[in-house]
Amino acid sequence: MLTYEEFCLRADEVEARIAAACRAAGRPANAVRLLPVTKTHPAEAASHAARRGFRAVAENRVQEAAAKRPAAPAALQWELIGHLQSNKARLAAETFDCIQSVDSEKLARHLDRATTESGRRLAVLLQINAGRDPAKFGAELEDAPRLLDTACGCTGLRVEGLMTIAPLGTTPDETAELARRTFANLRELRDTLASRSGHALPELSMGMSGDLELAVAAGSTCVRVGTALFGAR
Ligand SMILES: *Cc1c(COP(=O)(O)O)cnc(C)c1O
């Protein structure tokens, strides 16, 4: 595990990358939120993030986050970025402040039931397989309008936008080209859904350690970064 000082140096570097990408795209530096991904790292990673002023961290497994959260500062928020099975919706709704990986109508309904009973409203993003990657979770592009309709009809959910993960290519060039296309697809889908549905969908969660510049260029509002902040898993 990195020391706090080492983590701060890495965070400075990642923030500089985001700022440079924003400048290149003509976007304000505060248009993109950096979300540290603490999965597989000890609870200390979340404490480092909180101490440096990050308001939230992300995890990809419900149980892992539920185990770490009690050790972290209470004000720190937790976001789920990994696939969620409907039978874990209740624990997920109790553990997370935002669920970025809502990928089916069934899951939306389960989360709705869990939050409505607790009287809360849960922030969610709809995960879309915008790169058409058979190895990735996420709703297919064609199914996104129905998923949005269903999720927006859930009074326990607040749909803030869309999330995607770009597929990996076999070469760096191919990976970059796939990322560009995936991010452009998500941006285009958001614009279409927003104008048709009247829901603004301001959040576009896309970009990770290796492709955050491409995501910022395509309009990302949230980059999810693990490796570049905490080291290899
Ligand atoms: C692990 C993970 C990340 C972070 O990936 P890095 O390449 O380590 O920055 C981002 N998004 C999702 C959905 C992840 O599972």
Image (spheres, rainbow, N blue to C red):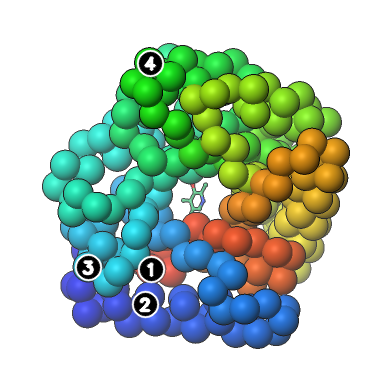
Cα distance, mark 4 to mark 1? 37 Å
Q: How crowded is mark 1: few (under 14 residues within 10 Å), some or many (20 or more)?
A: many
Cα distance, mark 1 to mark 3? 14 Å
Q: Is mark 1 on a helix, strand or loop?
A: helix
**Mark in front: 4 vs 3:** 4
User: Residue at (34%, 59%) from the top-left corner?
Assistant: 55
- Residue on which disc 4 sits: 117
- Residue on which disc 1 sits: 229
Q: Earlier in the sequence, mark 1 or mark 3?
A: 3
Q: Residue furthest left?
A: 71
Which disc, if any, is residue 10? 2
Q: Earlier in the sequence, mark 1 or mark 2?
A: 2
Q: What element carries label 2?
A: helix
Q: For ligand 1, tell me if the residue under mark 1 lies within 8 Å.
A: yes
- Residue on which disc 3 sits: 51
Q: Is mark 3 on a helix, strand or loop?
A: helix
Is the residue under label 3 in contact with that under label 1 (CB below 8 Å)? Answer: no
Q: Which amino acid does label 1 sit on?
A: Leu
Q: What element carries label 4?
A: helix
Q: For ligand 1, tell me if the residue under mark 2 lies within 8 Å.
A: no
63 sits left or right of 204 in the view: left
57 sits left or right of 167 in the view: left
105 sits left or right of 58 in the view: right
Which of the 4 image quadrants contains residue 130?
Answer: top right
Q: What residue type is labelled 2?
A: Arg
